[in-house]
Image (cartoon, grey):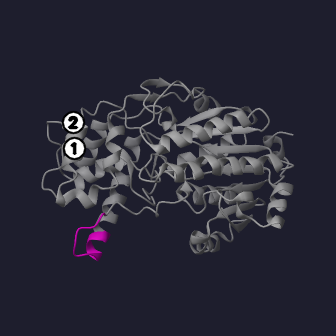
Amino acid sequence: MSDTRKQARGEAGTYFITGYPGFIGKRLVEHILREEPKAHVYALVQPKHLKEAQQLATRLKGLGGTLELLTGDIVDMHLGLSGEEYQRLCARVTHIYHLAAVFYLSVPKETAWRINVDGTRNVLELARDCEHLQRFNYFSTCHVSGDRLGVIAEDELDCGQAFRNVYEETKFHAEQRIQRAAASLPVTIFRPCSVVGDSRTGEIDRFEGPYYLGILLVTSPLVMPLPLPGNGVAPLNVVPVDYVVKAVWALSHDPRAVGRTFHLVDPNPMSARRVYERIAEQSNKKLPRFNLSARAADVMLRLPVLEKLARPQRAALGYVNHLAIYNCHNTLELLDGTGIRCPPLASYLDQLVAYVRDQYRQRHERSSEVEDPLDLSPSPSEDDADADLPRSR
C-alpha cells in the first residue's frame, strides 16, 4: 500500500532519523510530529549531543506523536545501539531519513570517509533489516557534481568530475552506494544546495558558505565593505531550511519519488553580485565598483582585522564564481499542486540579514575583542547534511 493511501487511512508511520539534533534534523523531527500526530520518531543522537537533544525533546512535548532518543553513532556497528534497540527498529521503522554527515573541509579524509561513506553503509544495513521499510531518504548535496560547469541534471552523478574538497568526494562515494542500494530498497535522494535560515524569521544555527561570506563582507569592521570576489555573475544558489523540510516531507511520502533524485535548489537564483549588493544596501553601504580575484580576496581575508572573522568563510570563495546550474525538474514536477515551492531569495533576504546582524550585535556586546560573530557552528563532527554547503556542510 502506498504512503499516500496509508496516510489517508490515518495509519501512523515510524521514523528513524540520523543527524539529530542538527540544523535540518531537529526541524524535520518537529515537522513530522506536527504533521503526523500519531507518529513514532526514533532519533539517533551522539552521546555528546544528548543533553541538547533532551532539551529539544522536552520542548516538543504536546505536539503529538512520540519522540524517542537513541544514543549511538553511525560509524559504529549496528549504529552503536543495543541489540534490543536495533531489533526494535528493524521490526517497526517505516521511513529512514539519513542526514548525519561531516561537512568540514579541514577534516582529515579518513575521518570524512568513515562518517560519510562507512556511516552511510551502516545505515543502509539497518534499512535492509527493516521488515516494513517504505522509504529510505538520503541527504546528499548538489556539490557531488564537483568541478562540473553548466547545467547539471538530477539523474546525473558520475560524469568524470574532479572534487575540490573531501566533503564533495566522500558524499559522491556515499551517493554511489545509495544508488546501488536502490536496486533492492525504496530509495529517494535529496541534493540540497546551500541551506540558509528560515524564510520567515531568518533563524539559523550556524553561519557559513558563500551567502554568509557576503554578509561578512558588508558587516565587517572596515568602513568600506570588501569588494566582491570575482565578477559575481554566477548564481548564488541558496534555499531556506523551512522549504527543505516541507519539500522533503512531501516527497518522502510520494510514491512517484521512489528511485529518483531531487535537487532542492532555487529554480531562479540571483547572481552573487546582486545578492551582495542587496546585503550592502541593508547595511547602508555600497560595494566597490572593482572586483577582486578569488585569490586576492583570500589574501585580504587573512588580514589581522578580518582573519578571525573570516576564517570559516574563506573556503567558500571557490563557490562564489562557480557557474553550475542545478536543474530541478523532478522536484518541480512532484511538488506541483502541493503549494510547496522555494521562495525567491529577494522575498526573505531582509529577514536573513536582520537575524545575522542581530547575532553580530549580541556577540559584540558580550565581548570587548573582535570574535567571529558568524561562527555559531558545532565542533567538527557528525552533523546533519544538511546546511549543505561544505565549510568552504
Q: Quadrant of the N terminus?
A: top right
* Relative image position of residue 90 (x, y in whole percent): 83, 55
Which residue was labeled with disc 2? Answer: 293
Using residue 31 as the reference point, say whether residue 361 is left or right of it.
left
Residue 34 shows up from this direction: yes
Range of magenta residues: 362-372
Q: Which mark is residue 297?
A: 1
Give residue 43's position: percent from left, percent from top.
68, 62
Q: Do tag 2 and tag 1 residues touch (Cβ < 8 Å)?
A: yes
Residue 243 is a magenta residue:
no
- Dot 1 alpha-carbon crowd within 10 angstroms: few under 14, some 14 to 19, many 20 or more: some
131 displayed left or right of 347: right
The three-letter amino acid code for the residue at tag 2 is Ser
Q: Nearer the viewer, residue 199 or 325?
A: 325
Look at 49% across and 32% down and name the residue there: 145
- Residue 374 place in picture, x, y as percent: 34, 60
Q: Please identify the quarter of the rendering in which residue 134 is found.
A: top right
Q: Nearer the viewer, residue 377 or 338?
A: 377
**Relative side of 363 to 94, left or right:** left
